[in-house]
Image (cartoon, rainbow, N blue to C red):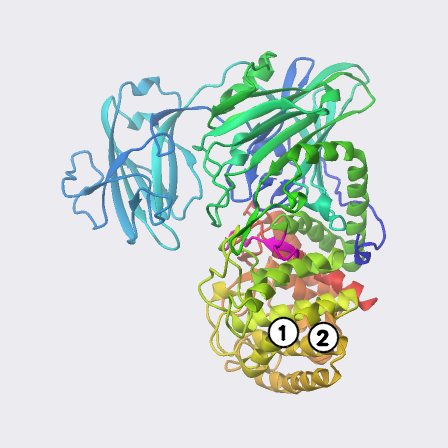
C-alpha cells in the first residue's frame, strides 16, 4: 500500500437502521456496487432492497444475478428479481427480421387509424436509426412516422400484454388507433411496458408510431409479448435488515424465516497490489446461521445470466460446465467472439468469457439452463443438467450451495465470479491483453484458483483497508465526507482497465462512462486524480503516459495536449470533435507536478520534459485570457475569457516552474515562476466583481466555482492570496441550493466533484461541511437511481447526464490536501 494510504484504522462505514416488516432501511447510496472491476465487468443494484430489482450493468442493461435460499423447504429470494418469461406475439429484431412502413414527411389526416392508406410510404427493415452499423433502415431526419400490420388469432388467451420497446427519442405509440404509450426521452435498451390486451382484436391489427429526434442518436425497435404465468409455489422475500458499504465491499444482512443470512460482495481493488487489482475476480460470500437456536436444513442458489457476456440479449452464447483440480466451473461467452471490433459508450462486452466458480470441497452443484427454467429446477429439487455444453440465448449459469443442517454457529461459503476479456484494449493498433495475462500464458482457471486459495487472506486485507480508508476520510472531513469517499472508491477504479503498453509501460486507461465513451480522456483523469495520488501514483502516471506518447510519437502534431486517445476500448487516436487546448495542457502539467510532489522526485517529468515545455509555452502565450474554446465543462458550451480556465493556465505555469526546480533547472524555474506570479494580480483585477470573482473577465454580473485554485493549496505554490479563497467561499455559501452550489451563474446544474474540490479550499471546517452536506444529501436522496451521478440539477437533484464515471475519485481531494500538508 502506498504510504499515503496508511493513516490509521477505524470502524467501517455502517449506519444502524431499523427495518419493520419489510420497510426499507435508510438509503446508503443511489446505487449499490456489487461486482466492480472495469467498464465491462460492472454489476450494480439500483434499489435499496437488494431483492427489489434485477441487478444491472452501469449502462442500465440487465446483468442479472439471482439469489435464493431454501430453509427447511421454504424458499426466499434475497438477490435480484426473477426475470419474467415472455412469449412473443409480435417479434422485435432480436427475435427475427421484420418490415415496417414509414415516412419522414408529416402525414395528412388520421395516420394512426386502421383505415389510413400507406401506399405512398416507404418500406424498410427494422431496427430503424442513424447508426449504419446497428440498424437496417437509416433515419437521419427530425421526425419519422412508422406503421406495422400484424395478425392475432385469440387475444383472450393472452395472460398479460406488454409493449417491448427500445426508442430514441420522444415517442407516441398507437395500437389500433388508440394511444397506448408516450414518452419524452429515450431508452438504451428494451423496456417492457404493460398495455391493455382489450386493445387487441382477433384478426388484423396495427401499431402506429411517431418518433421525434430532439438530441443525440435515433433508434426504433418494437414488438409485443405475453408475460407468462409463474409456475409452482410463490417464492417469499427475505427481510433486509441493513446494508453496509465499505471501500471494497457491500454487505447485506437478511432474515429468511428462522435463518439469518449475511451476504457480502467483495471486489478486492487494493491499489498497492497491481496483480490483485487487475485480477478480474470478485467474491460472493454467504454466511448463514439459525436465529432460533435450532437446526435448519439450508441450501443457497445463485443464478447468473449469460447476458453478462453479451452486448445484446439476442446474441447466441456457448456455456460450459467443467472442473479443475480444485474448482467446479461454469463458463459462458458469445459464439461470435468479435474481439475489440467495436467501441461505443452504451456498450457491453460481447467477447471473452464470464465465469462462475466454486470450491469443489463445498460439494456445490452447478448446471446450465434456459433463463426461465433455473428457478423452477431449484424449487423442485431437480437442479441437474446432463449437458456440459449448451448453446442458446439468455441462458443461466446456476450454482446450488448445500449448507446441510445449520444451527447457532455461523457457516460460511463463497462463490467466485470472473471475466476473461482475452484482449482488453487496442492501443494504436496493438491488441493488448489484460494486465494479469500480459504474457499470454496465464489462464483464467489459474486466476480463479489463486483467488480461492487466497480467499481468507484477501478478505482480511480488504477489511483492514476499508477501515483505514474510512478512518482517514472521517478525520479529514467528517462522517458525511467519509460516506461520500467510500461510495466513490470502487466506482472510480472500475471505470479503468490496467494493461501494459508495447513499450512495457503501465497504462491505467479510463472509459468516459455515459458522456461519450472516450478512452483516457484527460479532463476525466484530472478530477479523478486525488484518489490515485493518495493510494498509488503509478496509476496516475498510467493515465498520463498514453497522452504523452500520442504527442511524442508525432501522431498528435499540435502544441497542446490531446483530449483523449479514442473511444473505449479502441485507443487509436482522439475521437472527440474538437480540442481543449488550455484545459488539457494545464491538466497534464498540473498532474505531472502532483506526481513529482507526492513521489519526491521529478523523474517522470524529466522523461517528458520537451513535451511539457511545448505545452507550457502554449499556456504562456494563450492561457491567461483564453479565447473562445471548450473547457472540461463542455456541456455548458463554448466560452471566451473564462476566469476559471485562466486559473488553470496560471497554476499550470507555476507547476512547470516547480518541476523545473525538481529536476535542477533553476533558471528555467525562476523564469516561469515569475511569469505565473505576474499573472495573479492581473487576474484578480480583471475578474474582480466586488464580493466575488466573475465567470468571465468581460462580465462582472457572472460568477463560477474556481475549483482549479485547489492545486495552489495542494502543491504549495502560494500564488493566490488568501483573500481570493475567503471571498469566493463566502460568496458560494450564499448561492447554495438544496443539492449543492451551481457550477456557475448560467444554470442550476452542478458537478459534485468540483464542489468537493471547491470545498477543500474552504478556510474553516464549518464552511467545508456546509458545502459538502448538500452533496451528501444528493447521494442519499436523489430520484436518479444510478451509480454516483456527477452532473445534476442542484435544485431538484435530477440527473442532467453522466453516471458511473471515474471523476468521483476527486472526492478524495480534501484528504489529499491534508496529507500534503504533512509532507
- Quadrant housing the C terminus: bottom right
Q: Quadrant of residue 769?
A: bottom right
SS category of the residue bearing label 2: helix
Q: Is residue 240 visible?
A: yes
The tag earlier along the polypeptide, 1 or 2, is 1
Task: Give the residues in magenta.
Answer: 500-515
Please give left or right for residue 305 compared with residue 250 in the image: left
Report the number of numbered marks.
2
Which residue is rendered at x = 46% and y = 45% of the image? 341
| Residue indicated by mark 2 | 659
Query: Is residue 627 shown left or right of residue 16?
Result: left
Task: Give me the residue at 69% from left, 50% from top.
Answer: 489
The image shows residue 329, relative to residue 428, as above or below, that is above
Q: Choose top left, top right, bottom left or bottom right for residue 819.
A: bottom right
Does the magenta segment cover residue 87? no
Q: Is residue 314 above or below residue 528?
A: above
In the rendered view, tell whether residue 102 sits above or below residue 768.
above
Q: CA distance from mark 1 to mark 2?
A: 10 Å
Q: Nearer the viewer, residue 61 or 350?
A: 350
Q: Is residue 283 visible?
A: no
The answer to whether the residue labelled 1 contacts the one labelled 2, judged by CB atoms less than 8 Å apart, is yes
The residue at the far right in this view is 8
Most common secondary structure along the magenta stretch: loop
Give the secondary structure at mark 1. helix
Above or below residue 693? Residue 187 is: above
Residue 750, by quadrant, is: bottom right
Q: Which mark is residue 612?
A: 1
| Residue 91 x, y percent position in the rendering | 34, 29
Local crowd size for mark 2, using a 10 Å CA cut-off: few (<14), some (14–19), many (≥20): many
* Residue 512 at x, y percent in the picture: 54, 54
Amino acid at each position: 500500500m502506498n504510504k499515503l494510504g496508511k493513516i490509521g484504522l477505524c470502524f467501517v462505514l455502517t449506519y444502524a437502521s431499523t427495518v419493520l416488516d419489510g420497510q426499507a432501511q435508510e438509503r446508503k447510496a443511489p446505487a449499490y456496487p456489487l461486482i466492480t472491476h472495469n467498464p465491462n465487468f460492472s454489476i450494480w443494484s439500483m434499489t435499496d432492497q437488494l431483492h427489489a430489482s434485477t441487478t444491472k450493468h452501469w449502462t442500465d442493461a440487465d446483468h442479472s444475478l439471482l439469489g435464493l435460499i431454501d430453509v427447511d423447504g421454504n424458499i426466499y429470494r434475497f438477490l435480484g428479481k426473477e426475470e419474467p418469461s415472455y412469449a412473443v406475439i409480435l417479434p422485435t429484431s432480436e427475435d427475427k427480421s421484420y418490415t415496417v412502413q414509414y415516412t419522414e414527411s408529416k402525414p395528412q389526416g388520421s395516420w394512426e387509424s386502421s383505415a389510413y392508406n400507406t401506399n405512398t410510404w416507404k418500406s424498410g427493415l427494422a431496427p430503424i436509426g442513424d447508426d449504419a452499423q446497428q440498424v437496417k433502415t437509416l433515419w437521419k431526419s427530425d421526425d419519422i412516422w412508422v406503421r406495422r400490420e400484424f395478425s392475432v388469432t385469440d387475444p383472450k388467451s393472452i395472460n398479460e400484454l406488454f409493449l417491448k420497446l427500445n426508442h430514441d427519442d420522444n415517442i407516441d405509440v398507437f395500437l389500433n388507433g388508440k394511444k397506448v404509450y408516450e414518452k419524452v426521452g429515450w431508452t438504451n435498451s428494451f423496456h417492457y411496458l404493460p398495455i391493455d390486451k382489450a386493445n387487441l382484436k382477433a384478426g388484423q391489427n396495427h401499431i402506429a408510431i411517431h418518433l421525434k429526434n430532439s438530441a443525440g442518436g435515433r433508434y426504433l425497435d418494437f414488438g409485443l409479448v405475453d408475460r407468462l404465468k409463474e409456475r409452482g409455489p410463490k417464492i417469499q422475500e427475505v427481510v433486509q435488515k441493513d446494508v453496509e458499504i465499505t471501500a471494497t465491499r457491500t454487505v447485506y444482512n437478511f432474515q429468511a424465516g428462522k435463518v439469518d443470512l449475511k451476504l457480502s460482495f467483495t471486489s478486492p481493488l487494493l491499489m498497492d497490489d497491481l496483480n490483485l487489482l487487475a485480477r478480474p475476480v470478485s467474491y460472493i460470500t454467504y454466511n448463514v446461521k439459525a436465529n432460533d437456536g435450532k437446526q435448519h436444513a439450508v441450501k443457497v442458489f445463485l443464478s447468473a445470466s449469460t447476458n453478462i457476456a453479451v452486448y445484446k440479449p439476442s446474441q447466441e452464447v456457448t456455456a460450459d460446465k467443467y472442473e479443475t483440480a480444485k474448482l467446479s466451473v461454469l463458463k459462458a461467452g458469445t459464439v461470435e467472439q468479435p474481439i475489440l471490433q467495436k467501441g461505443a459508450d452504451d456498450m457491453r462486452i460481447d467477447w471473452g468469457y464470464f465465469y462462475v466458480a466454486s470450491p469443489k470441497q463445498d460439494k456445490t452443484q452447478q448446471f446450465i439452463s434456459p433463463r426461465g427454467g433455473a428457478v423452477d429446477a431449484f424449487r423442485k429439487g431437480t437442479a441437474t443438467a446432463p449437458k456440459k455444453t449448451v448453446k442458446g440465448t439468455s441462458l443461466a449459469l446456476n450454482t446450488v450451495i448445500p449448507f446441510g443442517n445449520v444451527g447457532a454457529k455461523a457457516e460460511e461459503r463463497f462463490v467466485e465470479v470472473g471475466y476473461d476479456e482475452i484482449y482488453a484494449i487496442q492501443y494504436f493498433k496493438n491488441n493488448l491483453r489484460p494486465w494479469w495475462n500480459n504474457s499470454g500464458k496465464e489462464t483464467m482457471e489459474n486466476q480463479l484458483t489463486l483467488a480461492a486459495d487466497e480467499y481468507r487472506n484477501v478478505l482480511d486485507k480488504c477489511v483492514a483497508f476499508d477501515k483505514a480508508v474510512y478512518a482517514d476520510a472521517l478525520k479529514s472531513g467528517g462522517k458525511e465526507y467519509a460516506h461520500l469517499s467510500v461510495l466513490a472508491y470502487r466506482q472510480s477504479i472500475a471505470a479503468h482497465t490496467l494493461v501494459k503498453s508495447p513499450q512495457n509501460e503501465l497504462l491505467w486507461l479510463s472509459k468516459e462512462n455515459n458522456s461519450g465513451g472516450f478512452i483516457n480522456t484527460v479532463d476525466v483523469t484530472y478530477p479523478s486524480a486525488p484518489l490515485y495520488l493518495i493510494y498509488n501514483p503509478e496509476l496516475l502516471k498510467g493515465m498520463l503516459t498514453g497522452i504523452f506518447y500520442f504527442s511524442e510519437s508525432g501522431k498528435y502534431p499540435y502544441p497542446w495536449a490531446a483530449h483523449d486517445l479514442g473511444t473505449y476500448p479502441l485507443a487509436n487516436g482522439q475521437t472527440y470533435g474538437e480540442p481543449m487546448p488550455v484545459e488539457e495542457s494545464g491538466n497534464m502539467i498540473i498532474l505531472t507536478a502532483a506526481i513529482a510532489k507526492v513521489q519526491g522526485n521529478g523523474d517522470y517529468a524529466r522523461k517528458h520534459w520537451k513535451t511539457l515545455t511545448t505545452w507550457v509555452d502554449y499556456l504562456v502565450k494563450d492561457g491567461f485570457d483564453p479565447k473562445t474554446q471548450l473547457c472540461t465543462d463542455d456541456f455548458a458550451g463554448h466560452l471566451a475569457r473564462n476566469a476559471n480556465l485562466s486559473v488553470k493556465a496560471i497554476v499550470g505555469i507555476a507547476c512547470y516552474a516547480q518541476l523545473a526546480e525538481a529536476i535542477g533547472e533553476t533558471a528555467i524555474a525562476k523564469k516561469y515562476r515569475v511569469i505565473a506570479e505576474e499573472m495573479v494580480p492581473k487576474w484578480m483585477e480583471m475578474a474582480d466583481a466586488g464580493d466575488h470573482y466573475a465567470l468571465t473577465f468581460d462580465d462582472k454580473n457572472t460568477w463560477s466555482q474556481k475549483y482549479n485554485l485547489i492545486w495552489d493549496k495542494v502543491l504549495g505554490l502560494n500564488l493566490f492570496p488568501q483573500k481570493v479563497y475567503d471571498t469566493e467561499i463566502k460568496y458560494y455559501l450564499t448561492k447554495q441550493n438544496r443539492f449543492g452550489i451551481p457550477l456557475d451563474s448560467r444554470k442550476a446544474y452542478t458537478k459534485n466533484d468540483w464542489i468537493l474540490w471547491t470545498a477543500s479550499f474552504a478556510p474553516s471546517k464549518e464552511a467545508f461541511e456546509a458545502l459538502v452536506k448538500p452533496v451528501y444529501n444528493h447521494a442519499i436522496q436523489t430520484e436518479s437511481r444510478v451509480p454516483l451521478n456527477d452532473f445534476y440539477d442542484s435544485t431538484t437533484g435530477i440527473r442532467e447526464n453522466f453516471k458511473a464515471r471515474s471523476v468521483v475519485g476527486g472526492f478524495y481531494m480534501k484528504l489529499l490536501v491534508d496529507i500534503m500538508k504533512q509532507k
